[in-house]
Amino acid sequence: MIVDKIKKREPTAKRKGPNIDIPVGKWIKCDECKEIIYRDTLRANLSICPNCGHYFRMHINKRLELIIDEGTYKRFDLDIETTNPLDIEEYPKKLKTLREKTGIQEAVACGTGKINGEEVVICIMDSGFLMGSMGVVVGEKITYSIEQAIERKLPLIIFTVSGGARMQEGIISLMQMAKTTAALTKLDEAGLLYISVLTDPTYGGVTASFASLGDIILSEPKAMIGFAGQRVIEQTIGESLPEGFQTAEFLLEHGFIDKIVERKDLKNTLSTLIKYHKN
């Protein structure tokens, strides 16, 4: 029989090769071009994809390294505990997990520092902490920073990245819009400079309050900026909207922001604007 003539194959021996140890977390995929990038390469390129130029979001500490002169940053000593006004059972657990994961206490860090020798009050938001949402602590820290800028007669710079008001804190989070806006009115009356730097994404109550009130409003390239998402707006007004109408480039063209600045130029641009205002 034909079956009898078919020789039984010997089991293939397992190939032995060198044990290659690939470290976990050393690579990241670009959302734009889908290329795999070595994390150290990405960091060296200011968290910008070397293949397509896509801007990755920056951790607070990395942003401080980029903008503030080395050794000059002094964080405001604010011991404010995040509350749970709606008694959401999972909220405190989520906050604890995020603090361990990100190494930061809340969605914003505030303090003083120098930018090319120019002293400023600076606030930097972080998308890694509940998408940079604005709750009571974020609102209070921003307000305190504004008050410190007035007291010390220093320019104020805020880097925004946010999904909006923090829903876990209900209406109390929405009250932060009015509080920060009132504080900025006092800053304006004192004749002090406020520069708002919008990064991807800046949405919701943050856009509707302090993010849009800068004397000068800058943005990183291709940042998404708006109040609500495109689909929500279209469903509300019953009309189609232009493609890309919430990009920094579209907003610059229509006068909402003053300038789009590449990440590598942000520090020098900020210090130049501060010097112009002083003079």
Image (tube, rainbow, N blue to C red):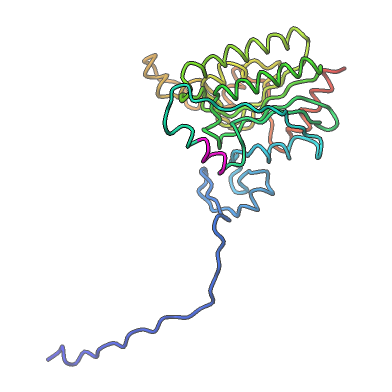
- Which residue is the extreme one toward the right? 279
Q: How many numbered marks are there?
A: 0
User: Splitting the image into 4 quarters, where does residue 145 fall?
Assistant: top right
Q: Does the magenta stretch include residue 126?
A: no
The reply, left or right, for residue 235 in relation to residue 172 is: left
| Residue at 59 percent of width and 16 percent of height | 209
214 and 3: which is toward the camera: 214
| Residue at 75 percent of width and 19 percent of height | 148
Percent position (x, y) of residue 159? 66, 28
Percent position (x, y) of residue 137? 59, 24
Q: In this view, does 268 lie above or below 250?
A: below
- Which residue is the extreme one toward the top? 189
Task: Give the magenta part as a residue range.
Answer: 95-100
Q: In this view, does 112 lie above or below 64?
A: above
The reply, left or right, for residue 94 in relation to residue 256 is: left
Percent position (x, y) of residue 178? 58, 11
The reply, left or right, for residue 76 in relation to residue 222 is: right
Percent position (x, y) of residue 197? 66, 26
- Which residue is the extreme one toward the left? 1
Q: Does the magenta stretch include residue 97?
A: yes
| Residue at 54 percent of width and 70 percent of height | 20
Q: In this view, does 41 lie above or below 210?
A: below
Q: In which quarter of the image is the C terminus?
A: top right
